[in-house]
Amino acid sequence: MNNEYVSFLKVKTKYKGIFSWIFSTDHKRIGILYMIGMLTFFSIAVGIGVLMKLEMLTPGKTLYGPEMYNALFTLHGVIMIFLFIIPGIPAIFGNFFLPIQIGAADVSFPRLNLFSWWLFIIGSFMAIASLFFSGGPVDVGWTFYVPYSLRSTTNVTFALSAVLVLGFSSILTGLNFITTIHRMRVKGMTFFKMPLFVWALYSTGWIQVIATPVVGITIILTMVERTFGVGIFDPALGGDPILYQHLFWIYSHPAVYIMILPAMGIVSEIIPTFAQRTIFGYKAIAFSSLAIAFVGYFVWAHHMFTTGISDTARMVFSLLTFLVAIPSGVKIFNWVATLYKGSITLGVPLLYVMAFIFLFSIGGLTGLVLGSLATNVQTHDTYFVVAHFHYVMFGGTAIILFAGMHYWFPKMFGKMYNEKAAKIALVFIFVGFNVLYFTMFILGYMGMPRRYWDYLPEYQYLHIISTIGSWILVPGLIIMFVNLLISLKKGKPASMNPWGGVTLEWTVPSPPPLENFDKLPVITNGPYEFAQKPENLKEEK
Amino acid sequence: MNYNDTTHNEHHTGYGGYVLIWLILMGLTGATVAVSGIDLGDYILFTALLIASIKAYYVVTVFMHVKFDAPVFKIFILVALFVLLSVFILTSFDVFYR
Amino acid sequence: MNKPIAEAIEEPLSHNQEHTHEQHVHRDDTGSKMGMWLFLFTELLLFGGLFILYMAYRHQYNADFHSAAKALNMTLGTINTMILLLSSLTMALSIAAIQRAKKGLSVFFLIATLGLAAAFLVNKYFEWTAKFHHDIYPGSETLLDGSSGKYIFYGLYYTMTGLHCLHVIVGMIVLSFMLVFVLRGSVNSDKNVQLENSGLYWHLVDLIWIFLFPLFYLIH
């Protein structure tokens, strides 16, 4: 069994050139294919965001008119949500590292995995193509609320079919991961010896499988409504537009847990490694992932408090919304406790994690403002909401996606990135982010509605500050990406385990060979057992 | 660990067993139709759904073999059904109390 | 105890030039079945959304639903229910047969299942065309002139039975492939998880109808 090591990047397959990638069923290549697609779409959507902020510099027209603005914020949302953050961490790092972390050679259904990627690409192209079809770019917001989505003359149906395809991609990935985790763990790796990233992917998979079909039927019904006028959502025919919102959010709320749970899983990986300590409260964190996934199904109508639902529903959903915050709190406490008395290295991944804890906490706490009925009336559909979800989605998930990129870059590509450039990028990103989005909390609280192209002059100074924030953030993102791209070629060669991690991916070469393991690993320990130095062995309460 | 799992359903139910379940299902269908003719007022919906659920139970446990499958399958199904049921109930808090 | 990789997979690991991943595809019937069940859950939730709408609208338009449902053909609906239940039986029998290496019997039951599915579709076709003939369809004059509740009832009726029919058609396509595989012998007494999974799908189609039937045809 002593075969010559060939990195998966260089292995020869029966296909040549680009086909050896786009027809590959190797989970590692698929992860990278997703990464390339997703980061490209992310960049486009960031560009759109910059354009939006430019328009907001002055009331009324700055660069373009309201129809264009509607199309831009719709596209920004659709790309960021469906092409970037929902596939997100599972598509890139789940694909790359799930099998390795459980000691497997690949996922349960490798061909289905490739098919998921193809669906992602086809759906993405359809979404972009919908910009150019007759009727013009869709202007209904990424939420596609009826009745406007039934009336808009833009090509809503085609854009919706793109989302349908993308949803299928997400479902199949979730299905694949759940089965893989049940069936492909190497002998000795019980559920409670799995890394927490795997627990996160497991919980996320269940949301992908169970919640996504609901948006599927919502989309199908909207398309059918537009085409055949069945009346189900159309108030002119007796339909109830609030029912659209129910079905839409029954998926889209759990969807935010699809976004954040994998990120939290990565945090649970980075902190033990950079504190060289076992995670505090492993089981609590594992169960909290399941709890978030589970309770997350029961809070969706907090997006609808002001739409006309019953008072009973409002009280029930507000209460459940407060409950779902608890398991997230458990995680934050346990992460901080892990750092306490750890042997901490302030490496780039940990710095991103620390930024995350700060940003996600702000996002989460402002969620309580939104979840509380009285304050919701003031803040619903204002910039307060926009700030909240950017803090949790961007400051939460995306920041950790970047953290994961740095953490696992050496493993995936066999190279080290430039530390200094990465840290400079992070400073720009962190400062720019807060200037851009914190001002939005104030704007929203003062009454600035979201998705408005025009506004009263009293809001202008805050809009200007916010836009300046985007001019600090974006260069930071550029520095970060360029650093990683250059390091792909010019980075120092990486060792098998540059950070001293103890999960299975750090026991295989950087980059891994095609089948990951030369010999199947033997699991005897728990997932986060570090060698303890005597001074760290103090009794903890 | 499970690279070569070739377990397939052992012969738990014979041909006759399946026919028996089918007969039960036909009987329950007849019952549903018969019951719909009786004026149960508010309970007609509940009764119809109850009978349908019993039919579903037989289809799932015997025809779909879940009765004889590993426990994990039963847990999966219960989780999915629980989520679905909860979503129904939570939605009803809105639509029934407007 | 740790299994070295050479025992765990059919072919020894080798890193030669023409190495392909396909050589190492292992067989995991339980995993395959698990994947299928997860897929079935997506179908459950897909139709679940429609049933939620039904619940809401029936509550809102109770009287209209009752009166609109009278125009549906209960006899045809009941016959269709029996057809699908019988098809579930023949499906289960087909799998039982192949597990006992009774290829001919398995083929017979598969064909029976397909025939029953076709009969279901034929009935549906007559039902729908009869409705079209009576000017009862989304956007028709009769419905637009009538009450909102009746309009919504038929909107739901066509959407839900229509989506169900699509699933019947897909099921027939899948079962046709299975028929070919059984005839060819690639599905046999040793290797039949594909047929089982197809059966699971078919039973789900039956299950959906089990709930659709009373909700549309038996409210009066």
Image: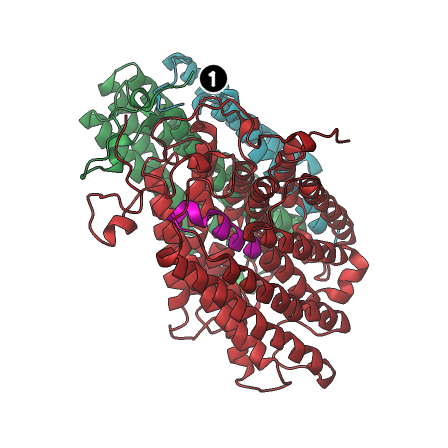
Quadrant where the C terminus of chain C is found in the figure:
top right
The residue at 50%/74% (across/down) is A71
| Residue name at image x 70 percent, y 66 percent | A384
- Estimate the x, y position of residue A65 in percent, counting from the top left: 54, 84
What main secondary structure does the magenta stretch of the protein show?
helix
Residue depicted at 50% across the width and 47% down the height: A213
For residue C113, above or below residue A451: above
Residue ranking furthest to the right: A374
Q: Is residue A211 left or right of residue C58?
A: left
x and y percentages locating residue A90 in the rendered image: 48, 46
Residue A340, position as x, y percentages in the image: 71, 41
Residue C118 in view (yes/no): no
Question: Could you tell me which secondary element the residue under label 1 belongs to?
Answer: helix
> Chain A appears in which tint?
red
Q: Which residues are magenta?
A: A397-415
Q: Chain of mark 1?
A: B
Quickly name the residue at label 1.
Answer: B68
User: Is residue C130 within the magenta segment?
Assistant: no
Q: Looking at the picture, which amino acid does disc 1 mark?
A: Phe
Q: Position of residue A420 (x, y in %)?
A: 52, 60
Q: Quadrant of the N terminus of chain C?
A: top left
Chain C drawn colour: green
Compared across the picture, whether A375 is left or right of A297 comes to right
- Of residue A138 and residue A3, the one placed in the foreground of this image is A3
**Image-quadrant location for residue B38:** top right
Pick the residue in front: A3 or C167. Answer: A3
On the question of residue A67 being in view, the answer is yes
The chain letter of the cyan chain reads B
